[in-house]
Image (cartoon, rainbow, N blue to C red):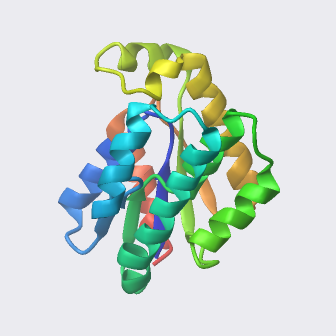
Amino acid sequence: MYILFEGIDTCGKSTQIDILKTKYSDIITTKEPGGTSFGLKAREILLGDTLESKRAELLLFLADRAEHYEQVIKPNRDKLIVSDRGFVSGMAYALANEQFDIDTLINLNRFALQDRLPDKVILFITDITTLKQRTSEKELDGIELRGLEYLLKVQEQMRLVVEYMDIDHIIIDARRDREQISREIEESVYQGL
């Protein structure tokens, strides 16, 4: 089972993946970008926010996604794989930049993923108050520096993508207690196995 944990920065998805890792030794955890050696290089470029062309940014995400699928996802499809981000985020950021249409993005991502979409998406949703509080406690990367309103716009695009594509998903209220969230995720993930 291939599951994406999606959400904007500081929503708690990485924390929840860490909790799952401590409880279940049989899961494979990864992330996009950064789940491969190529992905680490791509991540450095993308988080630096140095690319002027949004098309170049999109293509770099897609190149990383294709490599990540080939190296990590494809050989482990018979195991439980949890990825910190994936194509939903990639599409949402591209849509938030208002330079691409959703159907083109779907086709490009299906190509990168060899037409094998994740089995489930766990989408973390937050609000401006929680986002302000959590971002004030960390050093912001280049994408976060685009502003909180931009991040909330990306979050709405994530919701649009999972609904438009009719992907099996659950919405997590990221403002809640981490233990409540953890229980909800475990129930959702392990009932599908």
Q: Split into 4 quadrants, where in the image is the C terminus?
A: bottom left
Q: In the drawing, does residue 33 fall left or right of residue 29?
A: right
The mark total stands at 0
Q: Quadrant of residue 34?
A: bottom left
Foreground residue among 52 and 23: 52
Foreground residue among 36 and 130: 36
- Asked if one can make out residue 38 in the rendered structure from this viewpoint, the answer is yes
Q: Residue at the location (43% across, 70% down)?
A: 67
Depicted 144 relative to depicted 158: above or below: above
Q: Residue at the location (36% across, 57% down)?
A: 39
Q: Quadrant of residue 108?
A: bottom right
Foreground residue among 115 and 66: 66
State the image coordinates of residue 141 (x, y, percent, origin top left). 37, 27
Q: Residue at the location (68% across, 33% down)?
A: 97
Q: In the drawing, does residue 63 fall left or right of residue 180?
A: right
State the image coordinates of residue 102 (x, y, percent, origin top left). 78, 51
Q: In the drawing, does residue 80 fall left or right of residue 5?
A: left
Depicted 50 relative to depicted 105: above or below: above
State the image coordinates of residue 12 (x, y, percent, origin top left). 38, 37
Depicted 97 relative to depicted 104: above or below: above
State the image coordinates of residue 58 (x, y, percent, origin top left). 59, 49
Q: Residue at the location (58% across, 70% down)?
A: 112
